[in-house]
Image: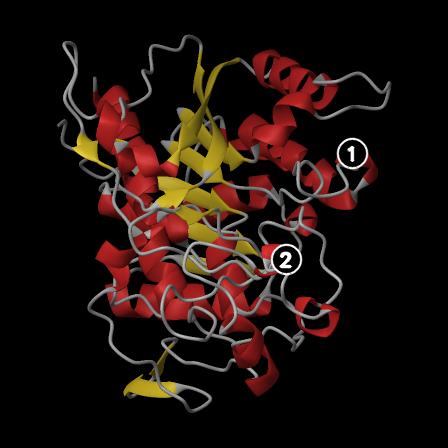
């Protein structure tokens, strides 16, 4: 691996910092993190304090931020930033959502990458999005029009993009999460995406490649122990751990009716009141994970059941499934399944983020590319 030696990065749409954890582990110094959600910003500040990082957390609407002003603040000239990275809000492109594309204000935020790229002229741009972006309709109603327009604008700014849909489980993360990653470089693009390291058990050994088996939910949750039953568990003087069970009593009754690896809607022997009007198609709602399998993609709207306990997964368990280190702490509220909170609670902070181990693998490849 090439030495990173002072590579500088800027994080936009930083969220809870999953992307940032991996980029920092790959040796980059992150100059600033731009994020609008106050709970995520609190998480980022706590993480920077724990890491001894000098990263600035800029809380607010990215559309009001001047890239030229940031260049001046950092003492950088255009072209000196090594990496611009982030994951803009995905709800407008998600196949699980309404797919409003550019008719949703969140969809337009994708093009903030262009505005920052034109000012900073970074050596590399790395972004993550849902794979629904590839087919998202634009202003003319054409499938794929949004992504096509985005690529054209990158190319007009002097960049050559490459992209790939990556399955998190292929890189040792126990989650069947597929996301689109775009790596864009100036002038030419010799970047090569990393090869998978893991595979389903039946595909691990063949005449061409040998892979490690997919990791399972049971492997990453097995040693966590019982969660705290209080609202939050105090772990460090200024940090609150998220391994906390806040499952409402009524939901515990429903969860008890769901076998490991199954979901509530298909338990047709139960009364309508217990199944809550779900149809058999609701396969991700009230899902109990299986210890010997991978998790479904962690989602903001649903919190999955623990494989064996009659409760929802805790934020810390979500973090384990996502690949966060255990010394990383989320700030902000922990929402029970029936509760609501303003802005992002801890479960949604995790579900919205890039798995840190995958971010590290991509950032290491980018560091090698830059140094070569």
Residue 265: assigned label: 2
Residue occupying image coordinates x 58% and y 68%:
38
Is 107 positioned to the left or the right of 297 in the image? right
Q: Is residue 92 visible?
A: yes
**Residue 232: which quarter of the image?**
bottom left
- The one nearer the camera, 257 or 176, is 257
Secondary structure category for the residue under label 2: helix
Sequence-first disc among 2 and 1: 1
Is 75 positioned to the left or the right of 236 in the image? right
Residue 102: assigned label: 1
Counting other residues with Cα less than 10 Å from the Cα at mark 1, is it few (<14), some (14-19), or many (20 or more)? Answer: some
Is 236 positioned to the left or the right of 34 in the image? left
Q: Residue furthest front?
A: 269
Secondary structure category for the residue under label 1: helix
Q: What is the x, y in percent for residue 109? A: 68, 40
Q: Is residue 30 visible?
A: no
Q: What is the x, y in percent for residue 1? A: 13, 28
Q: What is the x, y in percent for residue 352? A: 52, 52
Q: Is residue 83 above or below residue 12?
A: above
């Amino acid at each position: 691996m090439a030495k990173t030696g002072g590579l500088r990065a800027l994080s936009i749409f930083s969220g809870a910092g999953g992307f940032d954890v991996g980029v920092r582990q790959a040796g980059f110094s992150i100059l600033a993190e731009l994020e609008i959600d106050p709970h995520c910003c609190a998480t980022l500040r706590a993480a920077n304090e724990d890491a001894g990082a000098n990263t600035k957390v800029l809380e607010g609407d990215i559309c009001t931020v001047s890239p030229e002003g940031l260049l001046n603040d950092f003492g950088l000239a255009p072209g000196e930033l090594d990496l611009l990275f982030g994951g803009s809000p995905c709800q407008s492109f998600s196949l699980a959502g309404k797919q409003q594309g550019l008719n949703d204000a969140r969809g337009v935020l994708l093009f903030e990458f262009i505005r920052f790229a034109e000012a900073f002229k970074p050596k590399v741009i790395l972004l993550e999005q849902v794979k629904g972006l590839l087919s998202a309709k634009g202003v003319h109603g054409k499938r794929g029009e949004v992504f096509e327009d985005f690529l054209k604008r990158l190319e007009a700014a002097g960049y050559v993009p490459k992209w790939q849909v990556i399955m998190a489980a292929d890189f040792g993360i126990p989650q069947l999460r597929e996301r689109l990653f775009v790596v864009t470089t100036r002038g030419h693009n010799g970047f090569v995406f990393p090869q998978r390291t893991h595979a389903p058990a039946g595909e691990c050994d063949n005449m061409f490649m040998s892979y490690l088996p997919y990791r399972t939910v049971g492997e990453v949750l097995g040693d966590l122990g019982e969660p705290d039953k209080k609202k939050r568990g105090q772990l460090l003087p200024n940090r609150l751990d998220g391994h906390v069970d806040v499952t409402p009593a009524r939901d515990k009754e429903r969860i008890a009716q769901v076998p490991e690896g199954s979901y509530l809607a298909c338990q047709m022997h139960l009364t309508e009141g217990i199944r809550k009007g779900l149809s058999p198609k609701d396969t991700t709602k009230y899902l109990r994970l299986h210890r010997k399998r991978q998790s479904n993609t962690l989602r903001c709207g649903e919190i999955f059941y623990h494989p064996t306990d009659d409760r929802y997964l805790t934020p810390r368990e979500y973090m384990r499934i996502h690949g966060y280190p255990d010394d990383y702490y989320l700030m902000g509220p922990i929402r029970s399944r029936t509760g609501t909170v303003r802005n992002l609670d801890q479960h949604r902070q995790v579900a919205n983020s890039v798995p840190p181990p995958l971010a590290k693998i991509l950032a290491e490849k980018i560091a090698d590319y830059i140094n070569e």
